[in-house]
């Protein structure tokens, strides 16, 4: 199977590496320097496990700056482009995801598209409505920067916002590359998958905020 990945950040590259263990993966990025590093089997991001994997020179993994090379004849496309939060509009900037979807489907209308970029709740249904003859769904990631490849190999769970056979096939692809056995797989509706990501991020932020406050209190009170 040929799988395209848009975006060579820690999410995109770790997923590309995971899937390249068993399939042909071509990643596309606008940053030529990152593309060159990946093609020389050098990780452009700090990730020990990912660097070790690239050192094995995986023959099924390559990168390009040319979208057509990646999208043409591909079975799946994973989108992992930046969607930075805009404090002025109080919304995520999803333009990069929308641009990739438009370009990819103009090249290969049969592509099945999995979005792993962080997106607002309801986005999957909106973009699916724009392309009713295509399959576009959201699959949240639960990765740590610096250990993203490890977290993909030993995932806590796999969530895919598509209850059809396409969603099951994509989930199986992710599970196939994992070293952890019997990974829990959850197929949900599109909006539910987006909500899972939102609530997981919120819970993590609350935990971090709590421990920061605890640390400050202990410092002020001279507690060890």
Image (tube, rainbow, N blue to C red):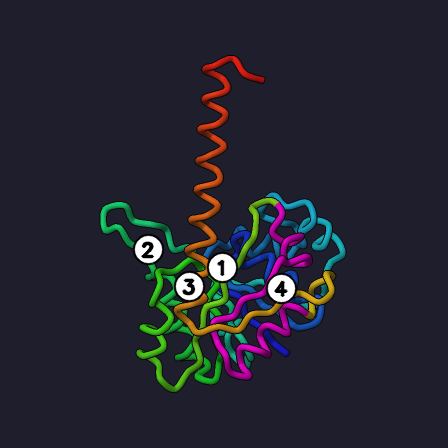
Closest to the camera, between mark 1 and mark 2, is: 2
Residue carrying label 2: 92
Residue carrying label 4: 62
How far apart are the alpha carbons under marks 1 and 4? Answer: 13 Å
Closest to the camera, between mark 2 and mark 4, is: 2
State yes or no: residue 164 in magenta.
Answer: yes
Which residues, given as a range, are shown in magenta?
147-175
Which residue is located at x 53 percent, y 77 percent?
A: 167
Sequence order check, earlier mark of 4 and 3:
4
**Residue 7 image label:** 1
How far apart are the alpha carbons under marks 3 and 1? Answer: 20 Å
Mark 2 packing: few (<14 Cα in 10 Å), some, or many (20+)?
some
How far apart are the alpha carbons under marks 3 and 2? Answer: 13 Å
Sequence order check, earlier mark of 1 and 4:
1
How far apart are the alpha carbons under marks 2 and 4? Answer: 30 Å
Mark 1 packing: few (<14 Cα in 10 Å), some, or many (20+)?
many
102 to the left or right of 40 = left
How far apart are the alpha carbons under marks 4 and 3? Answer: 29 Å
Tag 2 and tag 4, C-beta contact below 8 Å: no
């Amino acid at each position: 199977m040929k799988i395209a990945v848009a975006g060579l950040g820690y999410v995109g590259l770790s997923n590309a590496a995971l899937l390249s263990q068993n399939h042909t993966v071509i990643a596309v990025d606008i940053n030529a320097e990152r593309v060159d590093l990946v093609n020389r089997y050098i990780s452009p991001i700090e990730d020990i496990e990912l660097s070790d994997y690239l050192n094995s020179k995986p023959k099924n993994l390559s990168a390009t700056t040319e979208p057509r090379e990646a999208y043409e004849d591909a079975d799946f496309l994973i989108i992992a482009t930046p969607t930075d939060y805009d404090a002025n509009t109080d919304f995520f900037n999803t333009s990069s995801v929308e641009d990739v979807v438009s370009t990819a489907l103009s090249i290969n209308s049969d592509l099945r598209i999995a979005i792993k970029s962080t997106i607002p709740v309801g986005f999957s249904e909106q973009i699916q409505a724009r392309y009713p003859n295509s399959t576009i769904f959201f699959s949240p990631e639960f990765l740590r920067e610096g250990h993203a490849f490890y977290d993909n190999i030993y995932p806590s769970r796999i969530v895919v916002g598509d209850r059809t056979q396409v969603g099951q096939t994509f989930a199986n692809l992710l599970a196939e590359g994992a070293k952890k056995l019997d990974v829990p797989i959850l197929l949900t509706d599109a909006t539910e998958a987006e909500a899972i990501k939102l609530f997981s991020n919120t819970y993590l932020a609350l935990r971090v905020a709590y421990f920061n406050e605890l640390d400050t209190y202990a410092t002020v009170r001279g507690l060890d």
